Amino acid sequence: MRVLLDTNVILNVLLNRAPWVKAASAIWQAVDDDSLTAYIVSCTLTNIDYIARRLTNSERAHTAVKLCLDTFEICTVEQRTLIAATALAGHDFEDNVQIACAMLYGLDAIITRDTSGFQAAAMPVLTPDEFLKAHMLNNG
């Protein structure tokens, strides 16, 4: 299965954000175990760097970005992605860009902590807990 991970799922692991870290870590572990292929949008990396730098320091932010590059596949954002995103009905452009990436890359689902911004998605949009229950049985 190939899924898109929203920025908040990645940050839950990198910043050890309770109570969400447990389910997000189980998904990350599935990627590490090669039982799941996860993608992130290229602009997610700039968001992670910015947030991690503000909450920690530049060195930890750089390490977080490198870890993501080593772990996840990257959906690039090109003009066609942005055009597709502008055609979607959702009101949050960042979420629409992620939906457009998932569509253009033919991904099976989007995993996010906040599903409300992904109403325009043509594929299933699940929270980490929902994904684990539906596809991996438990989160450990």
Image (cartoon, rainbow, N blue to C red):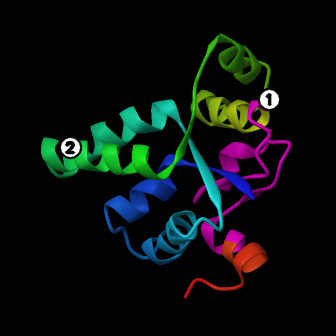
Q: Name the residue carrying label 2.
A: 54
Work out whether 45 lies above or below 71. above
Q: Is residue 39 left or right of residue 70?
A: right
* Residue in view at x 70 percent, y 72 percent: 130
Residue 111 percent coordinates (x, y): 65, 56
SS at circle 2? helix
Work out whether 12 lies above or below 41. below
Q: Is residue 51 left or right of residue 59?
A: right
Q: Amino acid at mark 1?
A: Ala
**Residue 89 — which label?**
1
The quadrant in which residue 58 appears is top left
Residue 134 percent coordinates (x, y): 78, 75
Q: Amino acid at mark 2?
A: Arg
Q: Is residue 38 left or right of residue 72?
A: right
For the C terminus, the quadrant is bottom right
Q: How many angstroms separate mark 1 from mark 2 (CA)? A: 32 Å
The quadrant in which residue 113 appears is bottom right
SS at circle 1? loop
Residue 70 percent coordinates (x, y): 41, 48
Q: In the current view of this chain or complex, which residue is farthest to the right?
A: 122
Asked if the stretch drawn in magenta spans residue 114, the answer is yes
* Residue in view at x 71 percent, y 44 percent: 118
Pick the residue in front: 89 or 133. Answer: 133
Q: Which sits earlier in the primary sequence, circle 1 or circle 2?
A: 2
Residue 1 percent coordinates (x, y): 75, 59
* Residue in view at x 65 percent, y 62 percent: 36
Q: Residues within 10 Å of mark 1 (few under 14, many from 20)?
A: few
Magenta extent: 104-131
